[in-house]
Amino acid sequence: MYSLEQTPSEVSKKLAQRFRTLRKQSKLSQKEMAERSGVSLGSLKRFERTGRISLESLLKLMHLLGRLNEIDTILSINENRKDIEKLFSK
């Protein structure tokens, strides 16, 4: 089946590549990142290699990089503007 949409595997690998770049820009080794975040070194290495990681571990890593607030954009609910306007027009 052909699709223009990325597969979950492709998305997770791209996310892992971006994470690796951010980790290196922060001048943190894998070992130091694992120790400071509370994520096992094996999990971190697997994530950077394959893109596979638990949500809890990903959140810990994002927190250490100061990027945890970016999780709010995932699955955000689009609020209906008319519903919001009704709140203020009463």
Image (spheres, helix red, strand yellow):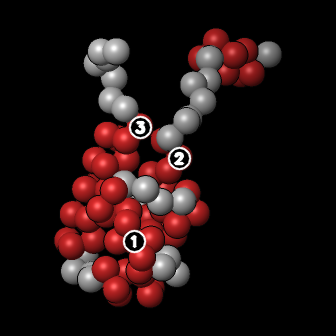
Question: Residue 40: horizontal and vertical position, in percent?
Answer: 48, 79
Count all numbered tags in the image, as a single digit.
3
**Callout 3: 10 Å neighbours few (<14), some, many (20+)?**
few
Disc 1 designates what residue? Answer: 44
Kindly identify the residue that appears in the image at 28 percent across and 47 percent down: 14
Kindly identify the residue that appears in the image at 21 percent across and 63 percent down: 21
Of labels 2 and 3, the one closer to you: 3
Looking at the rendered structure, the kind of residue marked 1 is: Leu
Disc 3 designates what residue? Answer: 8
Kindly identify the residue that appears in the image at 49 percent across and 77 percent down: 39
Q: Quadrant of the C terminus?
A: top right
User: Pointer 2 and pointer 1: residues touching (CB < 8 Å)?
Assistant: no
Q: Hey, which residue is sitting farthest top in the picture?
A: 82
**Callout 2: 10 Å neighbours few (<14), some, many (20+)?**
few
Q: Is residue 4 above or below residue 19?
A: above
Q: Is residue 80 left or right of residue 58?
A: right
Question: Residue 16: horizontal and vertical position, in percent?
Answer: 32, 56
Question: Residue 74: horizontal and vertical position, in percent?
Answer: 50, 40
Q: Is residue 21 above or below residue 14?
A: below
